[in-house]
Structure formats: structure tokens, C-alpha cells
Amino acid sequence: MLLGLVAGEVGLEPATHTVRTGEIVIAVKNVLDIEHTFVIPDLGIEETMAPGETTVATFETTEPGTYAFEIADDLAGSLDITEQQASRRNLARNHCGRSVP
């Protein structure tokens, strides 16, 4: 799942994202003229963002939950991670008791 965030003078846009467990890639563009650090403390993510640059953080999680992230005191948001849904094939197998081609 790829998420795009923009850190600007009016705040962080968008401030809340909902994604499913698995590999998550977050691209944050710093449109401000000073360096910032993008942090998701509970996931151990800390990435320095140079002025005018886009920083990419890639991680994988199997733990659903709501994780706060911040760039500065007034630039904060949350990442809501929900469980990955079972594939149609697995749902059909579980429902019918047999494999579906």
C-alpha cells in the first residue's frame, strides 16, 4: 500500500490514513524550507526530510492498530492499520470446505 503525505504550512495532508496489514510505503513531501523528521514511534520509524524533498519509508506490519505519526508539534496524524482480508479463494475454501480453482 502506497501512501502520499504533504508536510506544509497548513499542516499535514491528509492527516489520517486507513490501510491494511502488509507492506506499507509512505512517501512524505516536505514543502517547507527547513529540515524535519518523520516519526512513527510505535513502529520504530524515523526518517529525516530535507527541505523540498520527498522521503520514503517502507515497512511491513502484521499488527492492526492506530499509530500516531508526527513531523513537528503542529504536523501530526494517525495511521489506522486494519487486518488484511482473506482472499476470495480462501473465503470460498473455508465456506465450502473444498478448494476453488
Image (cartoon, grey):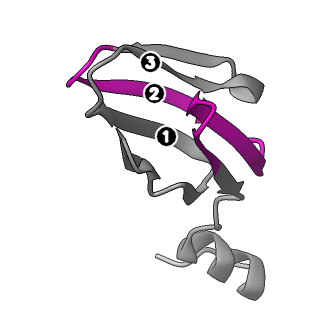
Residue 25 against residue 94 in the figure, above or below: above
Left or right relative to 15: residue 43: right
Left or right relative to 77: residue 65: right
Determine which quarter of the picture holds residue 7: top left
Q: Say which amino acid is labelled 2.
A: Thr
Query: Magenta includes 90?
Result: no
| Residue 24 disc label | 1
Q: Residue at (48%, 15%) from the top-left corner?
A: 47
Q: Earlier in the sequence, mark 1 or mark 3?
A: 1
**Where residue 13 sits in the image (x, y, percent)?**
42, 54
Q: Say which amino acid is labelled 1.
A: Ile
Q: Residues within 10 Å of mark 1 (few under 14, many from 20)?
A: some
Spatial CA span between label 3 and label 2? 18 Å
Left or right relative to 64: residue 49: left
Q: Which residue is mark 3?
A: 36
Q: Earlier in the sequence, mark 3 or mark 2?
A: 3
Q: Say which amino acid is labelled 3.
A: His
The range drawn in magenta is 50-78
Q: Which residue is mark 2?
A: 58
Asked if the residue at tag 1 contacts the one at tag 2, i.e. Cβ–Cβ closer than 8 Å, the answer is yes
Q: Is residue 3 visible?
A: yes
Q: For the residue labelled by badge 3, is the local secondary structure a helix, a strand or a loop?
A: strand
Q: Nearer the viewer, mark 1 or mark 3?
A: 3
**Where residue 26 sits in the image (x, y, percent)?**
42, 37
